[in-house]
Amino acid sequence: MDKEKPVFVRARVSQKLRAKFKAACALEGKGINDVLNELIEKWLEEHERPRGK
């Protein structure tokens, strides 16, 4: 993570989805925050448009 001050991002998901996600993260030995950051960064790479001059 960058040296920027972390902020909270909130989202609502079902209890079942959260439980499955939390378990999958644990099986990979990763924290939920780390995985969410990876997912957001990957999504941005795929969806950000290059900015023209």
Image (cartoon, rainbow, N blue to C red):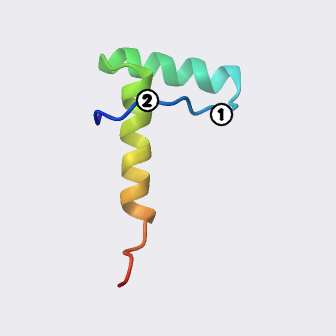
Q: Is residue 1 left or right of residue 16?
A: left
Q: Is residue 41 above or below residue 22?
A: below
**In front of the other: 18 or 6:** 6
Mark 2 falls on what kind of element?
A: loop
Total marks in image: 2
The image position of residue 6, as x and y in percent, is: 43, 29
For the point 44% across and 22% down, the residue is 32
Mark 1 falls on what kind of element?
A: loop
**In front of the other: 27 or 8:** 8
Between circles 2 and 1, the one closer to the viewer is 2
Return the disc, 2 or 1, that comes first in the chain's sequence. Answer: 2
Q: Amino acid at mark 2?
A: Pro
Q: Amino acid at mark 1?
A: Ala
- Which residue carries the number 2 mark? 6
The image position of residue 47, as x and y in percent, is: 45, 64
For the point 60% across and 23% down, the residue is 18
Q: Is residue 40 above or below residue 25?
A: below
For the point 65% across and 33% down, the residue is 11
Label 2, residues with CA under 10 Å away: few <14, some 14-19, many ≥20 = few
**In front of the other: 3 or 12:** 3
The answer to whether the residue labelled 2 contacts the one labelled 1, judged by CB atoms less than 8 Å apart, is no
The residues tagged by marks 2 and 1 sit, at their Cα atoms, a distance apart of 16 Å
Q: Dividing the image into 4 quarters, which one contains the N terminus?
A: top left
The furthest residue to the bottom: 53
In the drawing, what numbered circle is on residue 11?
A: 1
Q: Is residue 6 above or below residue 38?
A: above
Q: Dividing the image into 4 quarters, which one contains the C terminus?
A: bottom left
Q: Is residue 19 left or right of residue 42?
A: right
